[in-house]
Image (cartoon, helix red, strand yellow):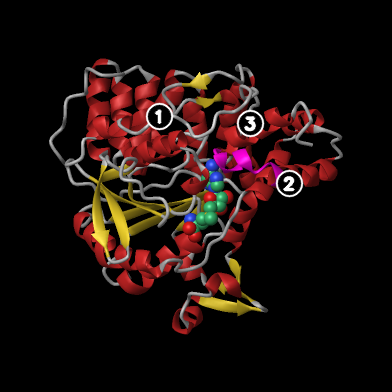
Amino acid sequence: MANDSFYPRLKAFVIETTGMVFFSDKDEELTGIFSKRFEAVGAGDCAAYLVYLETDKDELDELIAELTIGETYFFRHNEQFDAIRNIVLPRIIRKNQKNRRIRIWSAGCAIGAEPYTLSIILKKEFGAELAGWVIDIVGTDINKKFLAIAKRGRFRGWALRAVSDEIKNECFTPAGQDWTIKPYFTKNVMFRYHNLALDPFPSHLDNLFAFDLILCRNVTIYFNHETIRSIIRKFHECLVDDGWLMVGHSEPNMVTFKAFKSVNAPGTVLYQKSDEADETTSFAEVPPTPLWTPPLPPPEWKITTGTINAIEAIAPHVTPEPAPEPPQTGGSRLDEIRRLADRGKSGEAARCCENLLKTDKLNPSIHLFHALVLEQMGKDEDAEAALRRAIYLDRNFVLPHYHFGLFLYKKGDQKGASRSLANAVRLLSNMDDARAFEEYDGISVAQLKELAKIHLEAIRG
Ligand SMILES: C[S@@+](CC[C@H](N)C(=O)[O-])C[C@H]1O[C@@H](n2cnc3c(N)ncnc32)[C@H](O)[C@@H]1O
């Protein structure tokens, strides 16, 4: 197969799509995986399979399921969880006393052992201190089969090999030879599809912003410098001030992480977002040369991504701070508001919107952003009013319809949610699929339509 003239193109497509440059010198492994998929779909050669990949979006998921390696287990590298328990969580809890929330992202979570381990630690060891707090743990992965296992919460004994009998009995129920995690420990954990190499983040659409802690362990080992640099920069943007990043043992690289302050803990290193590091110069200093360059320019395949869950309200209590003036320079004012919101500064972002609305009150985009920020702050009634205003001001503006759908779904109004999401799909169907919503993480019409349809299907069951 390696002699097939379309093989380099197929290989380039796989590497571009997953970021897994690891496969650049793994032709034997790759051709084995391709052969399996060719047989499954009845493709005779690489060109036929490429056409198949383009036309059947489920096939990409099947291929990714074959390519990705999901080695993981509960309490994997316990010294890292010790550092989270002894250093990170106490500091986050002290810092977040006012807004009483904690947001954690497990990026590349595989079957969910990592986010569930965090949930067990938080509930078992910090439960009393955190009573009444809003805890969000988001697990994301590119492999939908892993995500399905994570959502089901049923694990082989092997995944629990580092779990003590005490925790096993307290947090899991035996299910034949398997173990099911108890609902108490799954309540604050949500899973969704997200491709670190392609999908945007920070992202309000995917609930990927303003985290106190991000874990991305044993994932970037498959990527090249360029992709890692871009991912780490985006993690930095997704963290609140003083937020924490934890990577796997084989991933630390002082150049890549220079924008963070490193904190040594027994057996591991933690990275903290800090004013002490100069992010502009630090990120620029990373060598920009990719380890691998595709032999042919990547083909223009359309990739669609999905997410099932609605955006969650995250901050029920926000302390008033002095109202800042809307920023006037350096990119659009809405961009600045987005940046504030991404860093968890919802109060400031809301006040910026309110200032902008004083002079531009018929602008539906500002009302939409205002609604998103208000929703983050837990001000659902105000958020609803702002969404209604955005729709009223421009009935053909698709984003408020989409968000109103998610909002109503969260409130339990399935009929209203269906109607709004169907409106969004109808409007999107009249638009050019390739058009990108620049102010909105650059998401394309096709991607948003796909997301809206996924939500609709989930609502209609
Ligand atoms: C070895 S597992 C790590 C699981 C867990 N973080 C741990 O350390 O126990 C690597 C995971 O990264 C995921 N992955 C690979 N490429 C990815 C990408 N581009 N975006 C998101 N996840 C990806 C794989 O599907 C796999 O589940």
Q: Amino acid at mark 3?
A: Ala
Front label number (1 vs 2): 1
Question: Which residue is tagged 3?
Answer: 12
Residue type highlighted by circle 1 = Pro
Tell me which numbered mark, 2 or 3, is placed earlier along the sequence.
3
Q: Amino acid at mark 2?
A: Ile
Specify the label residue 426 is tagged with.
none
- Magenta range is 19-28
Q: Compared with residue 427, is residue 143 higher up or lower down, i.e. above or below?
A: below
Q: Position of residue 10 (x, y in %)?
A: 70, 32
- The number of numbered badges drawn on the structure is 3
Main SS, magenta region, reads helix
User: Could you give the CA–CA distance between mark 1 and mark 3, rounded to whole angstroms?
Assistant: 19 Å
**Which of the pair 190/420 is nearer the observer?**
190
- Above or below, 110 relative to 118: above
Residue that appears at 17% across and 42% down: 276
Residue drawn where x is 44% and y is 33% of the image: 226
Q: Secondary structure at mark 1?
A: loop
Asked if the residues shown at circle 2 and circle 3 are in contact, with their CB atoms under 8 angstroms apart, the answer is: no
**Secondary structure beneath disc 2?**
helix
Q: Which mark is residue 33?
A: 2
Upstream in sequence: badge 1 or badge 2: 2
